[in-house]
Image (spheres, rainbow, N blue to C red):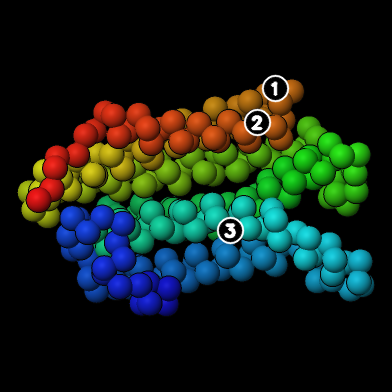
């Protein structure tokens, strides 16, 4: 499994104690689902039958890489949550089950969204081959991006609920002040991602921005800046 090859010392914050040192069955199942989603990203295209098809498949590495990075980010949030808190009660199992379902739902729209964005960029140079191959219009790219935005928002909302549940168990988990603020930061960040994704989905679906509305996702960086200003971490010795 993916998690088995990652050591505790590689956590993002060494000051945050890992409470989930043993890999649980819910994490094993989650890794399998994420592996399926990664496979769906790569295998979304039809197998190449000609040299031209093979060239197109290899050229698609650009949008595939972008989609892969987004899914890796989601997996990383999932990994960090279970390593840090080790909570797997009925509430978390329920939320995690919905999250895994949405991850599988998101895989194809995610790939299609980046394919359409890449097609839009290449069309600026006068090459509309990608749009023609996908049998879609620029307006269609906005619809696909809206699907992705809604799925992305749902995933981060679920992460926010999972972290809120952990906050309620602060005393049971013996969270330090530092760890508690980190958890608050996570809740704020996930809800911020929800807001940005839904705004992007709105502009992609209901305005003439269509596929270009994806640029609004860049505001996620602002969410992190506001988070660090709102929740200041205490100094660690």
Please give the residue where the numbered disc 3 appears in the rendered image.
Answer: 68
Q: How far apart, in angstroms, are the residues tagged by discs 1 and 3?
A: 27 Å
Q: How far apart, in angstroms, are the residues tagged by discs 2 and 3?
A: 20 Å
Q: What's the residue at 68%, 48% (across, down)?
A: 114
Please give the residue where the numbered disc 1 appears in the rendered image.
Answer: 207
Kindly report which numbered mark, 2 or 1, lies closer to the viewer in this rendering: 2
Query: In the image, is residue 31 above or below residue 176?
Result: below
Q: Which comes sooner in the sequence, label 2 or label 1?
A: 1
Please give the residue where the numbered disc 2 appears in the rendered image.
Answer: 213
Residue 124, percent from left and from top? 84, 36
Is 43 positioned to the left or the right of 168 in the image?
A: right
* Mark 2 residue element: helix
Residue 178, percent from left and from top? 15, 45
Picture quadrant of residue 1:
bottom left
Q: What's the residue at 49%, 66% (across, down)?
A: 33
Q: What's the residue at 23%, 44% (across, down)?
A: 182
């Amino acid at each position: 499994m993916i998690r088995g090859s990652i050591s505790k010392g590689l956590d993002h914050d060494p000051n945050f104690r890992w409470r989930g040192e043993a890999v649980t069955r819910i994490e094993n199942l989650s890794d399998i689902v994420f592996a399926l989603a990664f496979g769906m990203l790569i295998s979304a295209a039809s197998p190449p039958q000609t040299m031209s098809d093979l060239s197109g498949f290899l050229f698609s590495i650009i949008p595939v890489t972008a989609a892969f990075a987004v899914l890796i980010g989601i997996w990383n949030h999932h990994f960090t949550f279970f390593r840090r808190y080790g909570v797997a009660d009925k509430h978390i199992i329920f939320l995690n089950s919905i999250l895994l379902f949405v991850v599988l739902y998101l895989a194809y729209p995610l790939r299609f969204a980046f394919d359409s964005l890449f097609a839009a960029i290449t069309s600026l140079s006068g090459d509309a081959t990608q749009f023609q191959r996908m049998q879609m219009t620029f307006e269609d790219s906005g619809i696909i991006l809206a699907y992705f935005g809604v799925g992305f928002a749902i995933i981060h909302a679920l992460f926010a609920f999972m972290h809120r549940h952990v906050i309620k168990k602060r005393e049971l988990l013996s969270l330090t002040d530092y760890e508690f603020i980190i958890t608050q930061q996570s809740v704020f960040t996930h809800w911020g991602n929800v807001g940005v994704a839904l705004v992007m989905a709105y502009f992609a679906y209901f305005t003439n921005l269509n596929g270009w509305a994806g640029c609004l996702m860049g505001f996620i960086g602002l969410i992190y800046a506001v988070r660090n200003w709102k929740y200041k971490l205490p100094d660690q010795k």
